[in-house]
Amino acid sequence: MILIRLLGGAKKAVGKPAVNFERSTASVADILEFLVGISTDSRPLQPNNLIVAINGIDSAALQGQQTMAKNGDTVTIVTVVHGGAAHRIDGSQVSIIGVSRILEDPGKLVDRLRADNKIISIQAVNVDAVYGVAHALGVLRITLEAEKRKVMLANRREAELLLRLTCTGQISEAIKRAGLKKDAGGCFVAFSQDVEAMHRFSDQIKNEFEVEDSILDPSKEKKVRLAGLLGISSKFDDSEFLQYLLERAAILVK
């Protein structure tokens, strides 16, 4: 028997939080076909809208829909509709979430969120440091690649992300450029291979803050500010400027 746990829209579609699949083995495709057959609304169960994890590991990092579950496994189905931009990088689920206002002390806030979500890597920055979701996502890719190649500038991936986002090798300067500020907008970047933990984190942010992803979008004001910090011209179009930011993030070395 395979236990199938359902979260978000998948839970609503099937009408219960969990079901048993009376099979000794089944592929992800078999499981989705089974769920569609017992659902009242199959739309939330379209594969492109789902994260399917086998014992906490995203099946997209394994064999996709051909990933096999066996007797005793737990399969978690998450419909990706909750707040923030959701992505996958190298088997990790990533949430990049903009919030309109930080109401508590930024340092205590980040410490609390990390304590509440111990198996998730979490960084939080001022929205003025993020030139769109593609910027944050691209820097995270560079960060994880640096970790893989053992060429990180910092001891922790969260600090590495901050350094590369701000294009500096000095943590004090990085905080000065991108530190989260009280009574200002913020951006949370969180990533983990544990799908359920990421779902809980996204729900926590949605419950505690006013999610407003549009404040992450590129703007003329952000471009001028970031160009001034980096000592370059702001007379690039958006795509050229983004590419420059990512190139600067990638070439940082100790």
Image: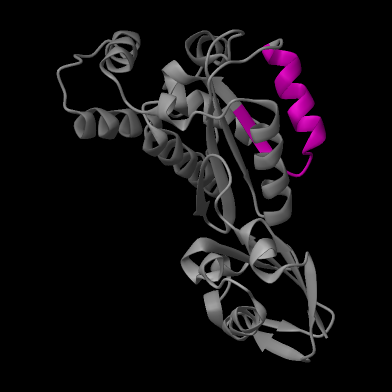
Looking at the picture, tell me which residue is in the foreground, 187 or 183.
Answer: 183
Looking at the picture, tell me which residue is in the foreground, 97 or 6.
Answer: 6
Residue 44 in the image, given as x and y percentages of width and height: 55, 65
Residue 127 in the image, given as x and y percentages of width and height: 47, 20
Image point (64%, 25%), residue name: 209
Magenta span: helix, strand or loop, mainly?
A: helix
Image point (38%, 38%), residue name: 134
Looking at the picture, tell me which residue is in the foreground, 91 or 53.
Answer: 53
| 144 over 105 or under it: above or below | below
Left or right, 100 with respect to 217, comes to right
| 197 over 7 or under it: above or below | above
- The quarter of the image holding the N terminus is bottom right
| Residues in magenta, as a range | 106-123
Camera sees residue 123: yes
Image point (73%, 49%), residue name: 197
- 90 falls in the magenta region: no
Looking at the picture, tell me which residue is in the foreground, 237 or 202.
Answer: 202
Residue 133 in the image, given as x and y percentages of width and height: 41, 36
Left or right, 208 with respect to 142, comes to right
- 122 falls in the magenta region: yes
